[in-house]
Image (cartoon, grey):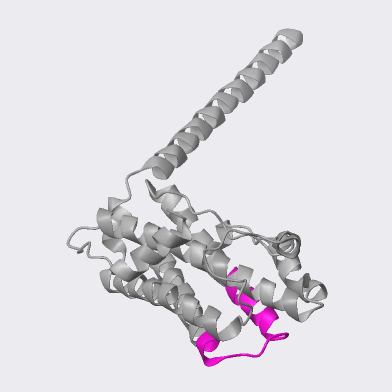
């Protein structure tokens, strides 16, 4: 009799664990499904939350950055062979390009997940170029044009962080790029001649221009998906981006 009770108790215990496992798997499946739904959900709800004034400010600022990059380049670079949009790269430029961190590639915005990633990468990319400019300034005389550009980058970064907050995105969900930070920190070791310093400044401003064009395209996408926002664009900055892309 005791053996029968023991067996029955064992069966009951096994059934309990089996039912618990089924419930946990079911809950996990629901969670995964919900995460998938959120990740692929349309972004109209998030766009409605975003302050249109902040979007307009950021859009205006990225246009200013695109206009001011050539001004900073003209004030900083005195080597006639280094011009924005020129894809002819010397051996020294190839070498330096390998030690200058690349900017993040911005995702096309189609849902909440891609919008969150895109905004986070904008912040990373802007901070990267700010850090690069600060490193080069240690070797190259600071100019008013470069200072203006730095302030605009910092202001745009703050506006995008404000958009992240408005949308309820958590920036801590996106890991820091430790490798890029190390490369920026070590950049001064490679700037051993005046020419190398000039090349580093040129490549940084060229990359900033390219990245800024990507940011502009992303903001145009946000504006296009946001109701009651005009689509008029600055023809000057559009042409700058066309020239930068070599089209």
Q: Most prominent secondary structure in the magenta stretch? A: helix
Q: Is residue 168 visible?
A: no
Q: Position of residue 83 (x, y in %)?
A: 56, 70
For image coordinates 56% across by 72% down, the residue present is 205
Q: Residue furthest front?
A: 80
Q: Is residue 24 above or below residue 155?
A: above
For image coordinates 59% across by 76% down, the residue present is 130
Is residue 132 on the magenta stretch?
yes
Q: Quadrant of residue 187?
A: bottom right
For image coordinates 63% across by 24% down, the residue present is 17
Q: Quadrant of residue 190?
A: bottom right
Q: Is residue 177 above or below residue 156?
A: above
Q: Is residue 179 visible?
A: yes
Q: Position of residue 144 (x, y in %)?
A: 52, 92
Q: Position of residue 77 (x, y in %)?
A: 61, 80
Is residue 115 on the magenta stretch?
no
Q: Is residue 229 above or below residue 20?
A: below
The stretch of residues the image draws in magenta is 128-147
Camera-nearest residue between 96 and 165: 96
Camera-nearest residue between 194 and 123: 194
For image coordinates 57% across by 91% down, the residue present is 143
């Amino acid at each position: 009799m005791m053996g029968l009770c023991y067996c029955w108790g064992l069966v009951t215990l096994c059934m309990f664990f089996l039912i618990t496992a089924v419930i946990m798997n079911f809950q996990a499946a629901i969670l995964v499904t919900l995460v998938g739904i959120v990740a692929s959900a349309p972004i109209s709800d998030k766009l409605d939350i975003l302050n249109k004034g902040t979007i307009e400010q950021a859009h205006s600022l990225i246009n200013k950055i695109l206009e001011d990059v050539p001004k900073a380049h003209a004030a900083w670079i005195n080597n006639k062979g280094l011009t924005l949009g020129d894809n002819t790269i010397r051996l020294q430029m190839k070498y330096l390009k390998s030690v200058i961190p690349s900017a993040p590639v911005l995702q096309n915005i189609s849902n909440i997940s891609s919008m969150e990633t895109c905004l986070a990468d904008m912040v990373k990319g802007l901070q990267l170029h700010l850090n690069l400019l600060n490193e080069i300034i240690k070797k190259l005389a600071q100019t008013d044009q470069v200072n203006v550009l730095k302030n605009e980058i910092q202001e745009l970064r703050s506006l995008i962080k404000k958009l992240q907050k408005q949308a309820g995105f958590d920036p801590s969900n996106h890991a820091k790029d430790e490798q890029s930070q190390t490369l920026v920190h070590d950049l001064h070791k490679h700037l051993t001649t005046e020419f190398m310093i000039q090349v580093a400044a040129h490549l940084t401003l060229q990359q900033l221009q390219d990245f800024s064009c990507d940011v502009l395209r992303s903001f145009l996408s946000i504006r296009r998906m946001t109701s009651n926002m005009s689509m008029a664009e600055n023809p000057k900055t559009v042409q700058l981006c066309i020239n930068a892309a070599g089209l």
